[in-house]
Image (spheres, coloured by chain):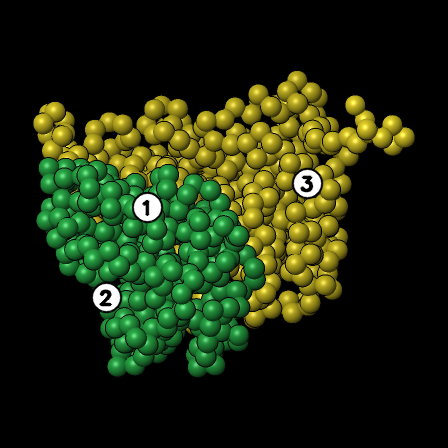
Amino acid sequence: MPSRPNLPPLSLHVPEPKYRPGDAVDFSDNNVPPAGSAPRPAVDARPDAFRDLAYALVRVLDDEGRAVGPWDPRLLPDALRAMLRAMALTRAFDERMYRAQRQGKTSFYMKCTGEEAIACAQAFALHRDDMCFPSYRQQGLLIARDWSLVDMMNQIYSNKGDRLGGKQLPIMYSTREGSFFSISGNLATQLPQAVGWAMASAIKGDTRIAAAWCGEGSTAEGDFHSAMTFATVYRAPVILNVVNNQWAISSFSGFAGGEATTFAARAVGYGIAGLRVDGNDALAVYAATEWAAERARTNQGPTLIEFFTYRAEGHSTSDDPSAYRSTGEPAAWPLGDPIARLKQHLVTLGEWDEERHTAMDLDCANQVKAAQKEAEQNGILGHGMHQPMSTMFDDVFEDLPWHLKEQRRQMLDEAKAAGIETR
Amino acid sequence: MARMNMIQAINSALDVLMDRDPDIVVMGEDVGYFGGVFRATAGLQAKYGKTRVFDTPISELGIIGVAVGMGAYGLRPVPEIQFADYIYPALDQLVSEAARLRYRSAGEFIAPITVRSPFGGGIFGGQTHSQSPEGIFTHVAGLKTVVPSTPFDAKGLLIAAIEDNDPVIFFEPKRIYNGPFSGHYDRPARNWSAHEGGEVPEDYYRIELGKAATVRAGEALTVLAYGTMVHVCQGVIEEQGVDAELIDLRTLLPLDIETIEASVRKTGRCLIVHEATRTSGFGAELSALVQERCFHSLEAPIERVTGFDTPYPHSLEWAYFPGPVRIGEAIKKIMKD
């Protein structure tokens, strides 16, 4: 009962997405600014001189597939085709590995369908030795960096070829050689780590920069805000990327604060350069990343980029999005499909056609298929023991302390006594 | 050999190592220009520069997260958490990240960081400046936990911790920063000048992690302690004239089980003392280990004297603190059993 009847009762706002299962989807009231309308500030401009960009949308490709405006990176056709191929290969890889999980060959998989432009185009804008601190949906970074698909699949299968010895959940890749930091399952933890890596690079007078990725949902983590604070305080040479794909499992972006403002606007409060970018426009993604990288390389400090995109499929193989959102959403998404848009651009330029696209898709599918065949020779999850049981204790510490040696000995003795295979 | 208190010894360890290894960086709240609220980093910024010794935002999560990234780059960060009571915002970065990085990357990325943090009570710090959270960290696979009890040990252990390629939680018992403490809070404070542990070489030396120190040999019972409690126990043993063997664990993980086992087999009696809360405290682990490994040598039940399972009270600090009265009673009980 209200204790002060002369005052209106308080009410709690609980965000609710516009569409639930069964609803007809209409995104026409989404404010999508025309391509080319966002200005491109000088690389050495102060962040407070272009705050509006945190609320705008950097777009290069228009509806006809032309590259327009100041953010057009003016890439050569060969570079555009390489980017297109990386995106297509990423999608083919996802399709194949998703199916492998459904066939029971591994426990888990996560696709990045609809978000390929983000990791792939960014990999082209970054240097090969710039350190990436990805979240779990940036497999495109590895693929665009020509990392071995077999190596990735070995990890997914936790098989004999898995460099990580079967210790990590599928898709939590790690490769120092590929400048790709070990993926954590805990969200946004990699953001302060990327800032620390970038600070270390600056302390040592290195030239390499760092980049990190998280979803819009995990901007709610303290890690995001600590990363932003440290990044601005020390002007760390880092790019912090927020992939706003609208959905964090079943929670829409409103539960991360998306109803009130943009995610790029988080930058304004920290005095960090902030950009909001069409994440399904590979050229805009490339241009924004190249611009942010140039700022970082010239000691202008960090940049926060929000990539506005849409998670076209489930969160993971353990998720069924039809249980919480309208199945009409992916098709109605107003920013289209990133692969289709880059393809259209190349066709518009007269540098591509349907025939070549079909051939490329077939070639990607074959490449993935061949890689899968090779990887499966190393085994698949759950079919035989791919790592000796004793390796469970490796790499907890550099050297095995007595208590782990003792536990290992006991485990092996008990297994032996019970007739269980240990290797 | 110089005379140092524990603060000076820690400062000396950092100085000696920073001089040898350009990859060591020191960071934390107030550690830079000012030299730390306890002065442990005094003079280091002036000597090694602002990019190797610097202040940080008040974000323990950020401090440790950034340190993990620096470690992945190849630096050897020594972050300070101003009080152990403030370490909890950094727990995810320590437990899920620093401790697991080597494991989850099969050794490709490591977190060679040493987290220094003053801990423990006896300074009227109330519930937010007195806690002993070591048991939280010994429970985590992949972390090492160290607690020195003298300036000499603090320097040698800190050097070994920083040089270690795994993450180390280095808890500094702040009650004994300036001198050993017998637990008699009503007696005049002593400083380190009369204690042999206050003799500290100015140069480099290491005390290997995982090695306990036998402070006093004896036959009647084994007392296991660390940090401030080593001195409190020593005082009680001397006052009672009991022939106890006092073992200063120094490193909680990895634990020096050999020294513990050999002692309890010899004495047949074991008292475990720590300042942290009792339930699921590190004493429970010690008690289980002694029971599992020395059961047939035991002549009396293992006893624990610990902090109570309450927050650290301010005005009732000395009722909470496991002081001479409680330790004395426990020794009498064990000897009677």
Q: Report in which chain the residue with disc 1 lies.
A: B
Marks 1 and 3, Cα distance to the nearest angstrom? 52 Å
Marks 1 and 2, Cα distance to the nearest angstrom? 28 Å
Q: Quadrant of residue A171?
A: top left
Instruction: Kindly report which numbered mark, 2 or 3, lies closer to the viewer in this rendering.
Output: 2
Residue B19 appears at what percent x and percent y? 35, 78
Residue A141 appears at what percent x and percent y? 46, 49
Instruction: Find the residue positioned furthest to the top.
Output: A22
Palette colour of chain A: yellow
At horizontal 66% and vertical 55% (from top left) the residue drawn is A267
Q: Report in which chain the residue with disc 3 lies.
A: A
Q: In this view, does B315 lie above or below A411?
A: below
Question: What kind of residue is marked 3?
Answer: Gly
Q: Mark 3 highlights which residue?
A: A258
Describe residue B324's horizontal placement relative to residue B54 as left or right.
Answer: left
Q: What element carries label 3?
A: loop
Q: What element carries label 2?
A: loop
Q: Which mark is residue B207?
A: 2
Q: Quadrant of residue A25?
A: top right
At horizontal 52% and vertical 23% (from top left) the residue drawn is A320
Instruction: Kindly report which numbered mark, 1 or 3, lies closer to the viewer in this rendering.
Output: 1
Q: Point out the image quarter for the C terminus of chain A.
A: top left
For label 1, count other residues whose C-alpha is less than 10 Å away and answer few (under 14), some (14-19) or many (20+): many
Q: Point out the image quarter for the N terminus of chain A.
A: top right
Q: Mark 1 highlights which residue?
A: B305
Palette colour of chain B: green
